[in-house]
Amino acid sequence: MHPEKLWYLRQMDFFSGLSDAEYEVIDRDSRTLTLRKRQLLPFGGTAQQAVYFVKKGSIKLVRTTPDGHSFIIDILGPFTLFGELEGVFADDDGEVTAEALEDTLLCMMRRDNFDRLMTLVPALGTRITKLSGLRLRRLRNRLVDMLYASVEERLAKTFLGLATEFGIAAQEGVLINLRLTHNDFAGLIASTRETVSTVLNSLVRRGVIDFRDHRLLLKDPELIRRLAGHT
């Protein structure tokens, strides 16, 4: 196994602590993919056929309906897994696509090889099942928020979620280290770009957030927690 590939695998919580022989199985049954920024992964219609591990970079998963409406299912950073849940969101009336938000390195494993690995290493299967369950619960909570929460509350909850995954400490607050457009934020909360732009601009004027090179800066994280309904 290439040392760099082994390093990435060891950094993923669900792959930590495996034996050398088990890492060799993963190496043998997977292959590496490189995506350029904004490049689409040949993912449509394959949600049941492959599982992907993000080694480096970030991926945006989008569900698009036949009438052209899009909803961002999730944004995933390094050392995360996708493909195990996306079939839940793909059906005859919609398609799930994956787009690199930046230059991204992936590890791809065919579904049959992935299932065989879960059988071969039961502890690994337990870890991934737990992580997938937590991710599915988070996604379902977002769907509930879209039905009942205001746009400002949904954005605040989205900010906090992104900060957990991509936030870095900055002099003025917490910087979300992703280049996201207003349209991306609209896709994350199932709203329109115009509505989201109005709320984002209001939050900027109030000194709650700002933007640095298309990256979101949370200037008042405590107020954002309150706007999100957290006490």
Image (cartoon, grey):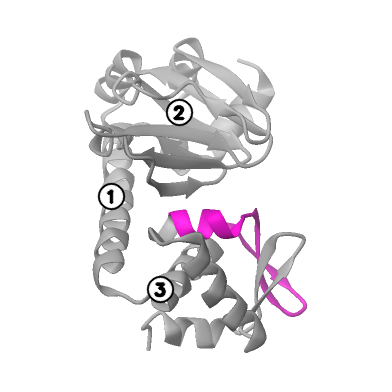
Is 57 placed above or below 174 here?
A: above
Q: Is residue 137 visible?
A: yes
Q: Within 10 angstroms of label 2, few (less than 14), some, or many (20 or more) residues?
A: many
Q: Is residue 175 magenta?
A: yes
Q: Which residue is mark 2?
A: 52
Q: Which mark is residue 151?
A: 3
Which badge, 2 or 3, is on the more N-terminal residue?
2
Q: Which mark is residue 136?
A: 1
* Secondary structure beneath label 2: strand
Residue type at tag 3: Val
* Secondary structure beneath label 3: helix
Q: Nearer the viewer, residue 144 or 30?
A: 144
Q: Which residues are magenta?
A: 166-187
Give the x, y percent position of residue 137: 26, 55
Q: Quadrant of the N terminus?
A: top right
Residue type at tag 1: Leu
Q: Is residue 116 left or right of residue 159?
A: left
- The CA span between labels 1 and 3 is 22 Å
Give the x, y percent position of residue 52: 45, 28
- The CA span between labels 1 and 2 is 16 Å
Residue positioned 43% across, 48% down in the render: 74
Q: Is residue 229 magenta?
A: no
